[in-house]
Image (spheres, rainbow, N blue to C red):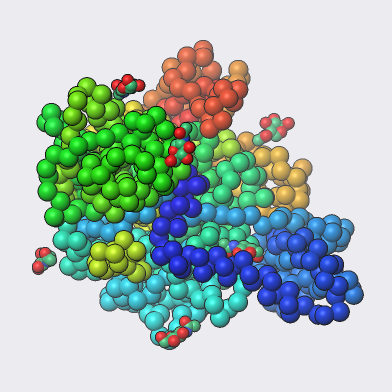
Amino acid sequence: MENTQHKVLEIMFPLGLLLLLLLLLKFSPAIANEQEPAAVGLRNMDDEQSSLQTYIVFTKKPEAAGANSLQHEDLNAWYQSFLPTATSSNHQPQIVHTYRNVVTGFAARLTPEQVKAMEGKEGFLSAQAERMLALQTTHTPYFLGLTKNRGWELWKNESNYGKGVIIGVVDTGIWPDHPSFGDEGVPPAPDKWKGKCELNGTVCNNKLIGARNCIHGDANTLSPYEVGHGTHTSSTAAGNFVKDANAYGNANGTAVGMAPHAHLAIYKVCSIEGCNSSDMLAGLDAAVEDGVDVISMSIVYYHNDYIPFHEDAIALGAFGATQKGILVSCSAGNIGPEHKTLSNEAPWILTVGASTIDRTIKATARLRNGAEFGGESVYQPKDFLPVLLPLIYAGSNGNRSSAFCKDGSLRNMDVKGKIVLCETGGPVSIIAQGYEVRSAGGSAMIVINRKQDGYTTLAEDHVLPATHLDYASGLKIKAYINSTQNPKATILFRGTVIGESSSVAPAVPFFSSRGPSKASPGILKPDIIGPGVSILAAYPFPTDSNIARKKTSMFNILSGTSMSCPHLSGIAALLKSSHPYWSPAAIKSAIMTTADVVNHHGKPIVDEKRSPADVFAIGAGHVNPSKANNPGLIYDIQPDDYIPYLCGLNYTDKQVEIITQRTIKCSKVESIAETQLNYPSFSVVLGSESLSFTRTVTNVGEAKSTYNLEKFVPPGIGIIVRPEQIVFSEVNQKATYTVEFIPHSHKQIGEINPQSHTGKDSKRYAEGYLRWVSDKYSVRSPISIIFA
Ligand SMILES: *[C@@H]1O[C@H](CO)[C@@H](O)[C@H](O)[C@H]1NC(C)=O
Ligand SMILES: *[C@@H]1O[C@H](CO)[C@@H](O)[C@H](O)[C@H]1NC(C)=O
Ligand SMILES: *[C@@H]1O[C@H](CO)[C@@H](O)[C@H](O)[C@H]1NC(C)=O
Ligand SMILES: *[C@@H]1O[C@H](CO)[C@@H](O)[C@H](O)[C@H]1NC(C)=O
Ligand SMILES: *[C@@H]1O[C@H](CO)[C@@H](O)[C@H](O)[C@H]1NC(C)=O
Ligand SMILES: *[C@@H]1O[C@H](CO)[C@@H](O)[C@H](O)[C@H]1NC(C)=O
Ligand SMILES: *[C@@H]1O[C@H](CO)[C@@H](O)[C@H](O)[C@H]1NC(C)=O
């Protein structure tokens, strides 16, 4: 998927622009060299330049100052004191970013030797080489019709459209002139807002109240103007109403984000290449300083290995934000469907997986024998006549490259005037496959899934008549080709279809990353799923395929957990608007305990194989905004509650201090097992001993209410909950209950298959739930049990 990401990003830009950017990046270090003092020997300098790297350096808070009365100058002087002093043979290292809010520390260009020298200094905690992060869009088709976001109708009455709430979007920047960022109906920014607008002129308004560039570099070339991704995510979270938006003639309606009257504050931390962790942390730091309420961040690490929270810049920054009452919503990642592929695992983050919506932009493949297979394509050419064309399997020459319709692989095949069957899973995006078919003379394309992508299909803006079909349909078409002398097929473009009876939405697409958590197996992740397949939202400028067709569009369709995350950020803003005093944990709890676990037909939510999706795919389930606004009970977590949890992860005092920015002695803290954190779900690692955990619920529903326990206990274990009834007489009253997990036998129902497929790491698991039910409310917690 990482490769695909690169490919896809490239396709988003006219080739010339991409090359220009690459060249600029390539040559900028050389320009810097020329400006170095001439006295420094050339060879020497080259060595140093090549070993210089950006490090994020974490320190203690300076002693003299109290935590809150810290002046900027004090902090700068403190950070400066860690840097080596310049000698004749080296240069004074430059601080790249100074952090004041979410972490204590700074980023600087340093050599490994300089870092080593710092380690002895009083107050030093750790230095981490900066790492690359990636945006979470899998595919970049473009454009099409506008539909109202699902759930919107139910929602608007209670929430006031998110009025008064500020969503900070940490992403690639914004294209401010888009109508989605108009401020009709949006009040001025609240008094607490301290941010700024680094955009040219007066483009900021009551909707877009701030935009800052946090990428270190030349301020003249880096403004928060952007390339696409950030505009899309921002408008999904809080785009204003855009009436009568219609596109390609395929759809017509009002485009609107989740919280249309919330404010947007933009922090540009990523370029088309991806993002640097030091810049991302600077974006979070600025957002907190400016006074945002919710942070939306569709970003994960490139490499999905185990990262403890004290080394995970996203987890660190999010912790600092959460401590200040800000909810941080992040993408789960796009490298499913295997287990243990998830990112952003910290319990203080709202981790969002993807789901499908019940809208398809339908393109049906019809074979000569009359069989039809429903697929998708955004490009719906009106002038493509549905006449039967010779059908050819691109892999019929036995060459895998050809089967994938890789660049140049069809050159020696006779595909002229034919409809070409290509397979996904090769190193090219499906749009690039279309380019190859077209340039080899093909008339149309059918793309079929590989096995692990199952039933997930994506609506993309192809360069020729095309449709994307699931794996099962692909097998049948291949068998048909084998079965006949003269196979033929065509494509019927059916336009936008909403709520088809065969739709199983919401379902989990193959790419949505899965738990269990690697960094903290005692916390169930992801937390929630939300729309992330073929999502239409604002887009800055006509895409290259649109230019080619002389179409201009202000909207674009993208897929990925990048799209799911801002849906949840916007919903969190609506909840914050209607419940201003709820903590980030309370908002999370409300979203999780009210989530749907069944689809539109009332059947269990399925995954890409159309099998019931497991808890590691859906977490608490599919977000239900209306219910989340009125959850009955919440599982709250106070900022300090994370300290015993972190100590329970067996982190050293120093590691805990990097996260908390406070001196902590874990030996003096009553540390807790991970599962003991007051989380709205349970993830239990069960050996031969029984385990017991407590939870505390707060009544935010009706004062006088009685809740009774319902539970589903998987075979092989016992779950005892005490008490089984909770009676409240007041609002905000708390009650505590205990859950005991007892291993009986090992009759488990599933197997965790991590990406490695070595089998060595595979473990058995089971799942269940418990639910507190009153006359009016149902408060559900999913349970996962991993057998140690
Ligand atoms: C909005 O809320 C009010 C009061 O809660 C209710 O009377 C009204 O029917 C609601 N309107 C809609 C459109 O749901
Ligand atoms: C500001 O806008 C003017 C006019 O559109 C343009 O020429 C200039 O380059 C812009 N400056 C920046 C920093 O974007
Ligand atoms: C879109 O819908 C509106 C309202 O239903 C209608 O007035 C308008 O003509 C439609 N536009 C197109 C292009 O169909
Ligand atoms: C990350 O930082 C390095 C070193 O400063 C720089 O060369 C690179 O362009 C940055 N990458 C991005 C995506 O900003
Ligand atoms: C398959 O096709 C590619 C591209 O045309 C070519 O480079 C490669 O050599 C072929 N492989 C085989 C085994 O024929
Ligand atoms: C089609 O025929 C080829 C060659 O005989 C065979 O390898 C392949 O499995 C067949 N495919 C299907 C789907 O039957
Ligand atoms: C922490 O260490 C204790 C004692 O060795 C052990 O029981 C516990 O499982 C460890 N916790 C984690 C999360 O590794």
How many numbered marks have been drawn onto this rendered protein structure?
Answer: 0
Tell me residue 444's x, y (percent).
24, 45
User: In the rendered image, which quarter contains the C terminus?
Assistant: top right
Tell me residue 278's x, y (percent).
63, 62
Residue at the image position 73 percent from the left and 66 percent from the top: 109
Left or right of residue 731, residue 251 in this image: left
Residue at the image position 86 percent from the left and 72 percent from the top: 41
Seen from the viewer's position, the closer of residues 592 and 619 is 619
Tell me residue 343's x, y (percent).
53, 45
Left or right of residue 253, residue 178 in this image: right
Instruction: Name above or below for residue 448 compared with residue 168.
Output: above
Seen from the viewer's position, the closer of residues 586 and 529 is 529
Rendered image quadrant of residue 59: bottom right
Left or right of residue 220, residue 129 in this image: right
**Residue 252 appears in the picture as rendered:** yes
Left or right of residue 625, residue 27 in this image: right
Ligand 2 shows up in which quadrant of the image? Answer: bottom left
Rendered image quadrant of residue 240: bottom left
Seen from the viewer's position, the closer of residues 747 and 27 is 27
Query: Residue furthest toward the right?
Result: 88
**Residue 281 appears in the picture as rendered:** no
Rendered image quadrant of residue 54: bottom right
Seen from the viewer's position, the closer of residues 121 and 645 is 121
Tell me residue 70's x, y (percent).
70, 73
Residue at the image position 62 percent from the left and 66 percent from the top: 26
